[in-house]
Amino acid sequence: MPLDDAVRLWSLLGFAHVGDDEVVFTQADVDALRGAQELVELGVLSPERQAALVRTWGRSYARLADWQTSLLATVAVESGADPDETVAALATEVIPRVEALQSYVWRRHLVSAGARRLATTDPTDLAAAPLTVGFVDIVGYTSRSKELTEDELVAWIEGFEDRTSELVAAHGGRIIKNIGDEVLFVADGAGSALDVALELCRRGDDPDDGFPQVRAGLAHGDVVRRLGDVYGETVNIAARLTSVARPGTVLVDRGAFEALTGRDGHDAADTHDAHPDLVFRRLRRLSVKGYARLAAWAVRVRER
């Protein structure tokens, strides 16, 4: 491999530049370069794909490693023993187990992702199958965060992320990423995504539930999928709807409305009977960034 290519991959992984006379590399680094080069030679990775993949690996594992070492350091301090010795001992015992679990989780997700990809009309088309994109945003996050200690804030956010992740997974959806006080998720069907959003809003409005009050926006349509993330107009619309939704409210776009009801979203007629279990209230055209007249509906469960 040309030296320039090796240096570039090192930088894409997020590692600092080192001098030529610094002893920092091991046989593992050589093996990694050889493996990367073999994937290129096999035609699996083009230079462009290789750069994107390596960059994503670097970012993801950097965050994971930072959290894991913080966890080890916390355990070491709580033990009351020498922190350096305790961290070293813990690392010896923990790292092999964590590495094995990480490989297991990756393989299981690989199987699931492969099954979803093969179920599309054209597995090579990144936007072949439409998805429902959802954003869930904590209401009053800034003011609330000022009232909490650092540990309390972390526990509050982790509780929000844990319960959201569990509910999304239970409905067959997938968390794409957490963005501060907001979660971005996708689902193959609009009904599943709406069930998630409505339940999260219900929990947030329950005074006896510690879940924070939230608001949500859903949009249904084609998306561009790349390296585990999603892009495109459908994602943008879902984000815009979330930004204008009232606390405890779920807003959906025209695509989601049509997927949920089977009705033409361009029809201006009353939509109170569009669904047997849901009530849709059509809003006045919204003016949000990038969209001067965005069609939207507020959705709630029909009372019996």
Image: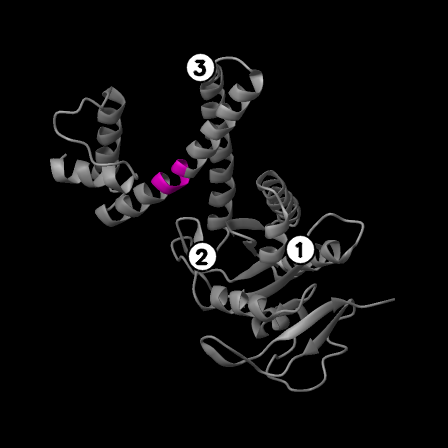
Q: Does residue 42 show up? A: no
Q: Earlier in the sequence, mark 3 or mark 1?
A: 3
Question: Which picture quadrant has residue 50?
Answer: top left
Q: Which mark is residue 196?
A: 1
Instruction: Give left or right: position of 117 versus 283.
Output: left
* Residue density around tag 2, few if under 14, some if 14–19, many if 20 or more, within 10 Å: many
Residue numbers of the magenta segment:
58-62
Q: Earlier in the sequence, mark 1 or mark 2?
A: 1
Q: Residue at x 22, y 29 (%)?
A: 34
Q: Quickly name the residue at label 3.
A: 92
Q: Nearer the viewer, residue 12 or 247?
A: 247
Label 3 sits on a secondary structure element that is: helix
Three-letter residue code for mark 1: Val
Q: Which mark is residue 230?
A: 2
Figure quadrant of the C terminus: bottom right
Q: Is residue 164 above or below residue 236?
A: above
